[in-house]
Amino acid sequence: MDAVKRKDAGKWRDEFRLPPRGIGHLEPGMIDPGSNDMLAFHIAKSAYQVRPDIWNLAWLGKETGLPKGELEKRIRSLYDRRILMLAAVPAVQVYGYGLYYWFRKFRPGTLGGVKLLAAQAAQKNGAIWEGLETTGAFDLVQGACTPTLDQLFWNILLPTAAHEHFEWTRICPIARALRAEHMNLWDAPAGKDREYEWGADEPAALLKAQQQIDEADVRLLLGLNRKRAPQDYFDFRALAEASGLDARTLETGVERLLLETRQLVPIVYLNWQMLGLTQTIFAVRLRQSVTIDRRSQLADELTAIAEFHTIWQFADAHYDLGLMACTQTANIAALRRRIEEIAEVDLVDEGQAHRQYRCWGCRLDDASGMWEQCVAPGAAVAEARA
Amino acid sequence: MKIDGVRPYVLEGLRHAFHPRRIAVAGASRHAGKLGYEVVQALRQQGYRGEILPVKPRAKEIQGLQAYPSLRAIDGPIDLAFLALPAYIVKSAITDCAERKVKVAAIAASGFKELGNAPLQDEITGFCRTRRLPLLGPNLLALGNPHFPFSCGLTSYNALPGHIAVVSQSGATLLAALGYSSTHTFGISFFAGLGNKADIDFSEFIAYAGEDANTQSIALYIEGLDSEEAFVESCRAVVPRKPIVALKAGASAIGGLAAMAHTASEPGAADEHYDRLFERAGVVRVRTLQELLDASLALSSMPPALGPNLVVVTNGGGSGLLAADECERRGIALQTLSCLSATLDARIAACAPRAASHLNPIDLGAASTADAYCNVTLRLFADRSVDGVLVSVCPTSITDIRKITGKLIELADREKEHRKPFIVELQGGGDCEAAIQHLRASGIPAYPTPEQAVAAFAALRASARLRETLPDRDAPHSRIDDLQQAALSLSQPGTNGALGIP
């Protein structure tokens, strides 16, 4: 691992200082998810399905080489085919929530119908933030944001359908969210947040692995997610026209969100299951003797591997790291070897995800008829309590 | 926002708003508990027989109905666009409404002037006025017409069809009336919770109520009036045919500030100003929510009291005394029968039980029968010196509440040509409550306390007095009858409605 050398650990600690969740806010719970800073994203999220002009098409045209009309046509087509979805990944801790994931394994011999019921229950449960169905070392990977671990246990896990059929449940509180679906988040190493990472060979492999999107679509996807100046994300005049609000106010809000509070990261999500792709999830346990700062340092080092499109660092859990890569576009065997080469690694469990029914509170499975039905963190908790 | 007078295109919009053949629900949701879900579900459950058009760019189908990505994607006319959308995307939907020539738009979202966002509210209102798009809300709770039937908004109550128009700036007050409707037989002709009432003014609802064939009285809850002269003018045009009763809130110092935060109502003039304003408009003013409900009920079902001479008939001395005291407090002190008429006392004595007291109240005694009540009441109806009759029934163990109630209903129906206010009061338990509902369903205002019954009479008297100050006017030509005729055909299962809905 070459991102941070062991001998630089002291320097790294000084720089990193292990602030609360590594984000630049003052205090958890002090930022209002409904604040005016969020307005531009709210408007975009409500309008982009029918108004591709809310994007900064001029910037996007230069970035992708595609003319405006072509951009609009492709964005609408990709949305209508449920391949793209705009999301703003929120750093839920700044709203006063913790983000908890858990891995679950069914008892041997559990009937398929029981698994289906469990999946349906999770799909319907608005408190579930993320949900993946897997095969392999574990059967379900789910996440939720709640104010406390107690609430996760009593309000979400215990009422879950068919829990008596699970052999084990491993709760993994997220200490740091470094990357999700190729997008570097607030806990990525300094300066790398909002960078959209794909392995060098992955775009070409993506084109070979499916027939639903072409090279221009991939360019568009990469362009939509390219890290850029706040003013280049949207056409703020279009947002102002849609909302009746002041364009400059909307732009200032995005500037504050992305550069100051860093409370969310915009992403245009690629719905891989719609393309027939699958994901490999590595759940990694480090040796018990590994120090806390070294665990974080290792997570940072792993961000150098672009094929890991999702990187979670857990705290006080059975697993210390969660890593995801696309089975069809990445070299999974090579990635596993790289993990196993890390001296501190004690265990690597592996699962294959074939279905993702929710991500960041938004439902993804079009077959359920609930595509892009979103549940805000607060609503999710309220629903779980109810 | 101020208007100079009732705008014809708004009146036309309200006709469609309360008889919508096609309702678009922008922001329709697949998620139970969200407004956009509940509105669609309620429309389906209420038996709305028009067309529901959910608008949701993320969904292809909502509750089994085809969903449209935008209002622009809907073919054909749209009578009502109900916007269950957050404030920040309302402008876009309103633009679509104008493009699609929607007849009327309703904004449920808050977050406008009441939260300091006046520029956005004013911009949207100005846009709507330029495009002649009548706008309800923002911050609107609900609107509906139980006769049609339909209800759109944040209410799960199914109001009872009736003759009282309820127009409330407060959602809470509207909910109280809607909830009260089915549990207390309070029939409603149409209702609207106005919220910030950015565009459509109280005066325009009053003008609409004036031409609505189902409406016989109008109940208003007001926090602020933007266009006082338009209000007065509209009321004066309607009051000769349909009484109006108003509850004005925000009289206290802190209440005025709260009204601004609630529905963006500007802190207004002193409360006495509204006394004078309502007097000029011919509007009966009440001070409590219960009075608003009680008075509007009486005004919807009884003629105005042409004079102050109320006679109280009771089988319980206490209830009669309480009624008498309340009459005096309200400036309509009871007169003895001999003061009212030279022969009334004798005629009552001839038909009342021997032990009855013939003052006013007339106390028939605890053993009073249905026949005694009816004989006395009949004579009071017939006596020209009596302006109204209040019958009070106390449920002793030998009082046959059901029989008395049934006979009084028969009597009132038989003698209705006297056109004299007739009010019943029953104080007691469940049997009295059931009798009250029975009486109300039969068109007789009935109440559980003497004070409420007297207040209802006082409203009828005030209504008559206020009418005398106004010029009588013929009802304007009304298109609403045509629409209501069509609504009737819609409500007949199996018919091809005149509105073209299969």
Image: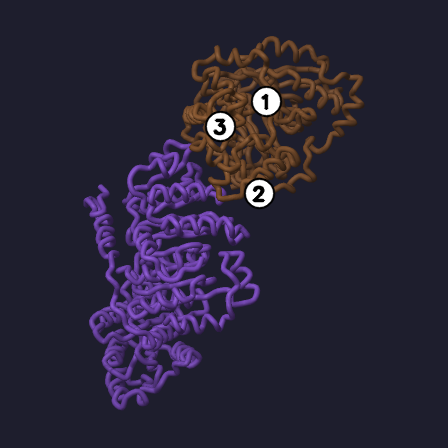
Chain colours: A brown, B purple
On screen, residue B35 above or below A86? below
Q: Which mark is residue A85?
A: 3
Task: Determine contact: label 1, label 3, CB under 8 Å.
Answer: no
First reached walking from the N terminus: tag 1 or tag 2: 2
Chain for mark 3?
Answer: A
How far across and how far down the image is residue A306, in percent?
Answer: 61, 17
First reached walking from the N terminus: tag 1 or tag 3: 3
On screen, residue B62 above or below A111? below
How far across and how far down the image is residue B68, in percent?
Answer: 36, 35
Q: Amino acid at mark 2?
A: Asn
Dot 1 and dot 2 within a common chain: yes
How far across and how far down the image is residue A172, in percent?
Answer: 63, 27
**Disc 2 or disc 3, which is closer to the eye?**
2
Chain for mark 1?
Answer: A
How far across and how far down the image is residue B401, in percent?
Answer: 31, 69
First reached walking from the N terminus: tag 2 or tag 3: 2
Task: Determine contact: label 2, label 3, CB under 8 Å.
Answer: no
Chain for mark 2?
Answer: A
Dot 2 and dot 3 within a common chain: yes
Toward which corner of the image does residue B349 lie, by quadrant?
A: bottom left
Other residues around mark 2 within 10 Å, as few (<14) / some (14–19) / many (≥20): some
Label 1, label 3: how far apart the Cα atoms are: 15 Å
- The residue that label 1 is drawn on is A196
- The residue that label 2 is drawn on is A36
Total marks in image? 3
Other residues around mark 1 within 10 Å, as few (<14) / some (14–19) / many (≥20): many
Label 2, label 3: how far apart the Cα atoms are: 23 Å
- The residue at the point 30 percent across, 37 percent down is B75
On screen, residue A225 above or below A239? above
Is there any visible trace of residue A158 in the rendered image? yes
Q: Amino acid at mark 1?
A: Tyr
Q: Is residue A57 left or right of residue A8?
A: left
